[in-house]
Amino acid sequence: MRTPLVAGNWKMHGSRTENASLVRSLLELLRPEYRAEVLVCPPFPYLLETGRQLKDTDVALGAQSVCAEAQGAFTGEVSAAMLRDVGCRYVLVGHSERRQLYGESDALVARKFVVAQANGLIPVLCVGETLDEREGGQTLTVVSRQLEAVLSVAGVAALGTAVIAYEPVWAIGTGHTASGEQAQEVHAMIRGKVAGLDATIGSSVRILYGGSVKASSARELFAMPDIDGGLVGGASLKADEFARICAAAG
Ligand code: PGA
């Protein structure tokens, strides 16, 4: 049985005051009977403070990116060891904004995945196609390629301690969420591909859906057999909306 995970990706939003109030409200709204594990990913400067606020709660802390190098002269970068040191349990790798706006290649994403795991972090590997790719019938090819880049470097066993997030680029921040069926088709392909390499990991790996998830669309998405929760951007900045998405996951 896979425990659903609902992750909030705050992106480059918030302030110390806003974050504190968001987390306070969220902790009040989350109910112990919710089955989903909950994760928030604040921007780097706020990790330590948000982590302190989450101490002794069931909400986990994650980062939005990580440097592919372990340490050294990499101005402006943040290492996986540093993220662990400030209390992160998870880290997003390969988010489409990193791939598209900062030129992160499949190969770089794979290195980030490996360095994250080597430092005890659980990578949330984001994959997904653009609108052009979907319209060109390339969805499964693109997602397979992104997955393959990590599998070829890290091996399928590495997915035993990782999470995959399918995030169609055309659905991110656009308000156009994928339908349950559209998402399920890709999730099933991802799970099938992993299961073809290792049946146990295929059935246990959590695959999240991301892209304009709202409380109103979460239930339909999370009801799909291969969707194990969500990676939520905009809606994770509103405590009541995010808590309702967590409720929808279980
Ligand atoms: P969105 O973002 O929910 O605002 O579409 C999702 C994401 O980028 O992870």
Image: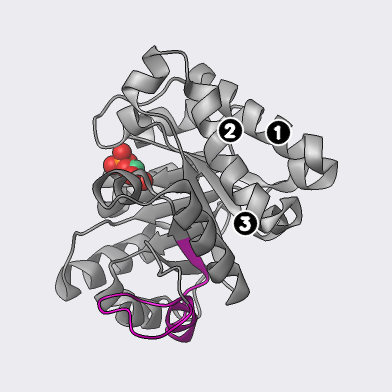
* Along the viewing direction, whichever of 40 and 116 lies nearer the viewer: 116
Pointer 2 with pointer 1, Cβ within 8 A: yes
Image quadrant where residue 28 sits: bottom left
Label annotation for residue 168: none
Give, as a three-letter code, the residue at label 2. Ser
Residue that mark 2 sits on: 144
Looking at the rendered image, the disc whose residue lies closer to the viewer, 2 or 3, is 2
Q: Earlier in the sequence, mark 2 or mark 3?
A: 2
Q: Which quarter is ligand 1 in?
A: top left
* Along the viewing direction, whichever of 213 and 151 lies nearer the viewer: 151
SS assignment at label 2 = helix
Tell me which colouring the rendered structure shows: one colour
Image quadrant where residue 173 sits: top left
**Numbered range of the magenta stretch:** 70-91
Tell me residue 165's x, y (percent). 50, 43
Give, as a three-letter code, the residue at label 1. Lys
Instruction: Note whether 214 is above or below 241 in the view shown.
Output: above
Tell me residue 228's x, y (percent). 59, 41
For the point 29% across and 44% down, the residue is 235
Is 232 contained in the magenta span? no
Pointer 2 with pointer 3, Cβ within 8 A: no
Left-right relation of 101 to 220 = left
Q: Which quarter of the figure is the C terminus placed in?
A: top right
Give neighbour class at mark 2: few <14, some 14-19, many 20+ (Cα, 10 Å): some
Kindly report the distance in space between the C-alpha atoms of the residues bearing marks 2 and 1: 8 Å
* Along the viewing direction, whichever of 209 and 56 lies nearer the viewer: 209
Instruction: Note whether 178 is above or below 209 in the view shown.
Output: above
Kindly report the distance in space between the C-alpha atoms of the residues bearing marks 3 and 1: 15 Å
Residue that mark 3 sits on: 162
Residue that mark 1 sits on: 193
Q: Earlier in the sequence, mark 3 or mark 1?
A: 3
Tell me residue 87's x, y (percent). 46, 80
